[in-house]
Amino acid sequence: MVGFCIAAFGPACAHETSFRGLVLATLPAKGEIVIRHEALFGAPPAITTFKIYARDARAVRVGSAIEATADADSTPWTVSDIHSVGNEALTGLPAGDGAPQILRNVHHVVIGEYAPTTQLVDERGAPFSLRDLRGQAVVMAFVYTRCRDARECPLISSRFHELQEKVRGKPLHLVLVTLDPAYDRPAVLARYGRNYGEDPARWTLATGDPDTVLDFAAQFDVTAFPDQRVGLIHPERTVILDRYGAIRELIDEGAWTPDEILAAVAHDERLASNPFERLDLWLSSAAVSVCGNAVAGFSGFTDLLTVIAIAAFFSFLLWRVGRTIAKGAA
């Protein structure tokens, strides 16, 4: 897969380049830094966790606008030669040396363990916990109602509506957890749910005490970074739980389709499922896992066939050129 990543995406997986970005968080104990950056290594603008050298860590502050050099030959990518070119206030956070960290000190879940049963609140204001859904498979994702990027939260919410329509009569429940709990109170979530045709019997929208909700999301490695221009920037993660509350899938890309999710759920429940839908989902997740932001938007089997076709075309072209050169030399 690493070879495929390098061959298929070329410069996206190798070399160094300079870039500009904004420091969202630093993780000194891990030697890492989180940066919102412009297009990099052929990938669109994104948030990336970089490794950082100790000599550079002292010059980095949350809210610093920086110019730096990124090296994609390491995993995660490495950032060096950092120069601050100013400060930018993050929404709700002061800029400069006094800016607090917004990453949370929580246990990070892994596949196979039971999901946290944190006490939350649903869109009707009633207590809610994943424990309440034992006996049903669960598909869960993270959104916020003020998101205006049609490719992110609205798209996930629309796909949840499609899932809801496909699972009538099946033991499967859908959960969307807000990443903006201070604003997304139950009444706001209820209105949002009506906009997407939510049926509370099959689909729950969850909020609660802000610190509790954000700690819950952070356990799934979902942290929202405030940004004055777009609101909240956060990773895409969809979670599949089995009927016992154990984590079966952690899907780190947003290009999935309802049929792919349903195939994964059925497979986890040892029921008949579409192997091509599962393969498509696995390819998408594997590409993101191995190549990271370099393959943002990779959509699995279809894109793999496209890459193979392009590689075959250029291989044939090189073979023809080499054959022509060989004939000329003879």
Image (cartoon, rainbow, N blue to C red):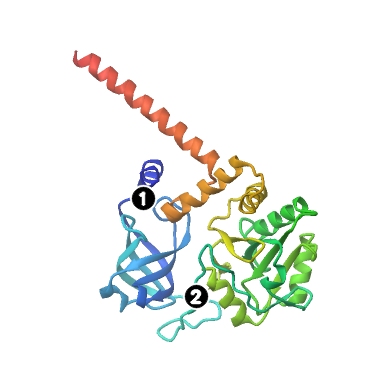
Kindly identify the residue that appears in the image at 47 percent across and 50 percent down: 286
User: Where the C terminus falls, by quadrant?
Assistant: top left
Amino acid type of the residue that numbered disc 1 sits on in the rendered structure = Cys
Image location (x, y in percent) of residue 135: 71, 64
| Residue found at the very far left of the displayed protein | 330
Image location (x, y in percent) of residue 95: 46, 81
Quarter occupied by residue 146:
bottom right
Residue 153 visible in the shown view: yes
Image location (x, y in percent) of residue 114: 58, 69
Mark 2 closeness class: few <14, some 14–19, many ≥20 residues within 10 Å: few
Amino acid type of the residue that numbered disc 2 sits on in the rendered structure = His
Task: Find residue 280 and name its label.
Answer: none
Kindly identify the residue that appears in the image at 36 percent across and 28 percent down: 315
Secondary structure of the residue carrying tag 1 is helix
**CB contact under 8 Å: marks 2 and 1:** no
User: Where the N terminus falls, by quadrant?
Assistant: top left
Of the two numbered discs 2 and 1 on the same chain, state the one appearing first in sequence: 1
| Residue found at the very far bottom of the displayed protein | 98
20 sits to left or right of 152 = left
Q: Give 242 or 323, whichever is nearer the viewer.
A: 242
Residue 225 visible in the shown view: no
In space, the residues marked 2 and 1 are separated at their CA atoms by: 31 Å
Q: Give 103 or 251, whichever is nearer the viewer.
A: 251
Q: Name the residue carrying label 2.
A: 107
Q: Give 74 or 219, whichever is nearer the viewer.
A: 219
Q: Name the residue carrying label 1.
A: 13
Image location (x, y in percent) of residue 296: 49, 52
Quarter occupied by residue 153:
bottom right
In the rendered view, would you say 329 is above or below 246? Answer: above
Mark 1 closeness class: few <14, some 14–19, many ≥20 residues within 10 Å: many
Kindly identify the residue that appears in the image at 37 percent across and 47 percent down: 2
Secondary structure of the residue carrying tag 2 is loop
